[in-house]
Amino acid sequence: MERFRQLIQLISAFVANCRLLITPSNPIYKGPLKHVCFPGLNCYSCPATPWACPLGALQSAFASLKANLAAGKINLGLYVIGSLGVVASLVGRMPCGWFCPFGLFQDILFRIRLPKLELWRPLTWGRYLSLIFLVIILPIFLTDKFGYGQTSFCKYLCPAGTLEAGIPLLIMSPELRSAIGTLFYGKFALMGLFIFWSMVTIRPFCRTLCPLGLILGLFNKVSWLRLRFHQNTCVDCHACELICPTGVFFATGRDDINSTKCIRCFRCYALCPGGAVTIEFSSIMKGELENIEGCDCNQKQG
Amino acid sequence: MKSRLPLFIFIFFCLLTLSGIVLGEPGEVFQKAVAICLSCIGIG
């Protein structure tokens, strides 16, 4: 399953960045696909992408909320929130593990042979701060005299934006180079930090600061697709905890198997020698849980 | 009831998406996404 996931990640990264005819005079795709948000962290200012970024679009909606309301226009970000919710209600945080190009980038960096470090678990709370302050509060409330806020997460934090949009656009557009300042150098340093961190710790950005992962992860417990841990068939080998890329320690009861941290890579499911992890789909018609292997999960629940 | 929750959540977000489409929000997303986001690249 891991090989299959890696293949899907590669295909997805290509789909997310499939614009091949890029010219300096036309650096950004302006076709109809830009109406649609790609379910992953993929900057919409990246010259190669034909899609919109859900986080960028969400912040833009929040940033123009005051001004729009003052002008009698309504843009509450319902389209972006709704489309993220539709994906997340079906598969939870699975796009992080299977479709996100920046997730794939971090996975590749982690393959570099260097001593590896565990992530200090309290840092995972940074995702909440990032979502609440940089995506919601600052764009809505820190506005200029015209009522417009800023896309604070993109501006101050997003390393994917620097990597996918900032660097290529600065290479392609000499006129932009004269405008870079402290902010760009700060973001560049932050991107460098995450690149190095990704070599020694698996997926540090996803686990510490990614608000998109948190939004999708909040649906993990209630999504149509869920993981289930069967304590009675667990052989206590703890292989699942060693292999988990996001440190979800469910076998010891420290975390829920459907924690917001789980990116649904299904490594634990594929590896478990006792078959204690199953993937289940909530049958939306019958209101029952069904195992993908066809076994009677309702009996297991009992 | 609890096991039907994914269905209710799915329908709720489908309705939210449709409301956004009716209000013309994809057009707003498009407008933002076709311009170079100077903030995203650390300028401005």
Image: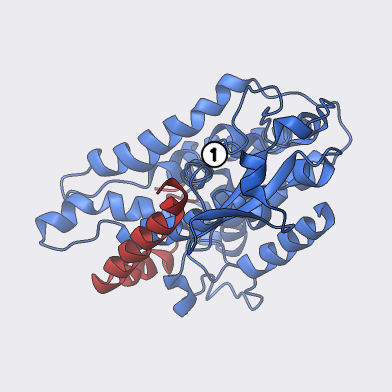
Chain colours: A blue, B red
Residue A249 image point, x, y percent: 68, 27
Dot 1 surroundings within 10 Å: few (below 14), some, or many (20 or more)? many
Element marked by disc 1 = helix
Residue A77, located in which quarter of the rendered image?
Answer: bottom left
Residue A209 is situated, as x and y percent measured from the top left of the image, at: 53, 35
Residue located farthest toward the right when viewing the structure as drawn: A113
According to the picture, the residue beneath numbered tag 1 turns out to be A187
Amino acid found under the numbered disc labelled 1: Lys
Rendered residue at 74%/57% (across/down): A293
> The C terminus of chain A appears in which quarter of the rendering?
top right
Q: Residue at x 56, y 20 (%)?
A: A122
Compared to A230, does B37 lie above or below?
Answer: below
Q: Nearer the viewer, residue A285 or A3?
A: A285
Q: Say if A179 sits above or below A210 in the image.
A: below
Q: Chain of mark 1?
A: A
Horizontal side of A277 relative to B9 (left or right) equals: right
Q: Where is residue A51 shown, x and y percent of the image? A: 51, 68
Q: Is residue A210 above or below residue A253?
A: below
Tally the numbered discs.
1
